Structure formats: structure tokens, C-alpha cells
Image (tube, rainbow, N blue to C red):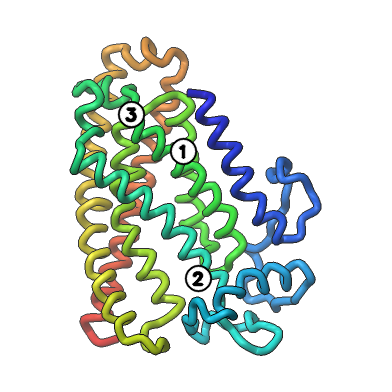
Amino acid sequence: HTGTTAASLRFVLIFLAPVSALQGENKDVLDYHAHKRESCGTRGRIWVPTPERNYRRRSSLFPQKMGIFNFRPDEKYCEEHSDADGECTRADLFAFQFAAGLMLFYLGLVGFIAWHITKTAHNNIPKTPEGRIFGYLKEGENLNVAIFCFQAWDFVVSSMIPEHCSLVFLSHHFLAALTAFLSLEYQYVHHYAVFFGGLSEFSSIFLVFCDLEVFFPAHMQDDSFYGTFIFACQAIFTLTFFIYRVIGWWYVSIRLWKDAYYVFNNGLAERLRPGKSYVLYMFLAADIILGTLQVFWFGQILQKVAEVLSGN
């Protein structure tokens, strides 16, 4: 399915073109690999307005300026981020959550439906180790295209926003995009892509709103329903994260490793994908790294829960 991979690459270039334009770049968007970004190193530096930045900020502030959205950001995220008139909206943070939320809704819902409701992730491939490792699933292909596009976009945009530019998150985005690309290019682990790339993101649907509340706290908003809604999302997120990203992740990972051992031990890996066995090894390595990240993040979630229960 090289054609599908090429199509997804073209989609990413089109998707990232507005980002390059808003940055004031004069280079061809096809040369985005050569673009030098230094945003990760700008923490604590003085925000110096430039024509390009002013253009980007004014265009992104438009919905809030018009009163379509009226979220007030936490003051700690407003240092050196005020508009020319002294107003701080941090529309970049709001826009990031909105854009990411659209894709996470898609990934989570498609994964949930394919895994739990229609069960196509289980029934549309042979129920054998080689079926789960090499079998083709339309849902798996669609999810991989979406994951690759989203994670590539997330990697680039997060590197431009200090609040999202961390080594842990950028590493996650890179690994997720890489595994999606390899799965598309060599038709590997579509069955497992539905879980790891789709169903596991079901918890992220609620995380979008939890993260929104971090930047736009409920106590600073006029709408009392906002706080109630956020509290419900926090509770559901914690539960679904534990179910799918901790318990479910490692349960499914054990089956992935058993299936991989079977296809390696029986020579199926080389027979069905000659010269590409290293790709499956890369999937297994990424599974361990990303699975460890889930446990690390859940530890942080529990710390936040403890703070809430203690009244802090």
C-alpha cells in the first residue's frame, strides 16, 4: 500500500503548509525538513513581536476577539503573551486543543467502534498470530493514515508552543508517527494499530478538555457548567486511561509479543515480509517504550488525583 503512504505524506505537506505560511517562511513547503526551528529553546526568553508573529497572532485571536470563544487563560500563561492592546487570550493554546481534539475524537471513536461494537478488528482477519501481525484491515489503514498525519503535525506545532514543547511529548509524537508510517508502508500489525492507535486514544477525548482546563481554569470562567463538565471529564479520563492505557495496553502487548514470537520462530516473518523482519522488532521496541510512558503518565495522574482529594 505504498500509494496510500504517499497520499498520507502529501496530506501532511498540505496540512503543514498554513503553519509555514503563518511563520513567515519564504521557503518551499516541500523543503520543510530543512526548516530550522528554535522554539524549544525559547522558554524564558523575551517575546519579541515581529510582523510574521503579529500576523499569526492576530489571525489566531480572531475567534476570541469576535466573542465566539471567551475563555480567560491563567495569568501564568500570559507572561509576554499579551496582544498589542494589553489583552491576553492565548488563542494559540485554545486552537491547539481544538485541532488536536478533532483528530483524537476520530481516532478514539473509530478504535472503540472497530474493537468493541462492530468487532471488525477481530473478525475481518484470520484469528491466528500471522493474521494479527500481517492481516489487512481497512480500519487499521485509515487509523494509521490519521495517526501519521496527526502526530507529524503535533510534533511540529508542539515544538512552536513552549507549553507543549517537552522532550517526553515530542518523543512520543515521533515514535507514534514512525510506527504508523511503518505499519502503512509494510502492512504490519493493523489489528494492533486499532487498539494502540485508536482505542487507547478513547481516553484522550476527555484529556482534551482536562488540558483545556489547565490553561483556562474553571474558577476564572463565568460559566459554572464549565467546571462541572471538566470535573466529569477528569473522572472519566482517569478511569479510561487506567482501563485502556495501563491494564489494556499491557494485556494486548503480551499477545503482540506472543504473536511476534510465533511468526519469528516459524519463519513466517521472513516468508511473508522478506527482508523486513527488522520492522517487527522496531514495533516491539516502540511498544515497550510507549507502554512505559503510559505507566509514567498514570503515576502523574494519580499525583493530581491525590492533590484534588487533599484539597490542594
Task: Name which residue lies at 27% across and 20% down.
Answer: 130
Task: Name which residue lies at 27% across and 16% down.
Answer: 265
Q: Mark 3 highlights which residue? A: 137
Which label's residue is closer to the chain start, 3 or 2?
A: 2
In the rendered structure, the answer to whether residue 103 lies left or right of residue 312 reads right
Task: Name which residue lies at 41% across and 76% down.
Answer: 214
Which label's residue is closer to the chain start, 3 or 1?
A: 3
**What kind of element bears circle 3?**
loop
Q: Mark 2 highlights which residue? A: 94
> Is 195 located above or below residue 279 in the figure?
below
Q: Position of residue 167 (x, y in %)?
A: 51, 57
Marker disc for residue 145: 1
The residue lying toward the viewer, choosing from 78 and 106, is 106
In the rendered structure, the answer to whether residue 209 lies left or right of residue 64 reads left
> Is 295 located above or below residue 284 in the figure?
below
Q: Position of residue 182 (x, y in %)?
A: 47, 31
> How many residues crowd mark 1 within 10 Å: few (<14), some (14–19), many (20+)?
many
Q: Amino acid at mark 3?
A: Leu
Measured in 3D between alpha carbons, the distance from the residue under mark 1 to the one under mark 2, in whole angstroms, is: 25 Å
Q: Position of residue 293 (x, y in %)?
A: 36, 53
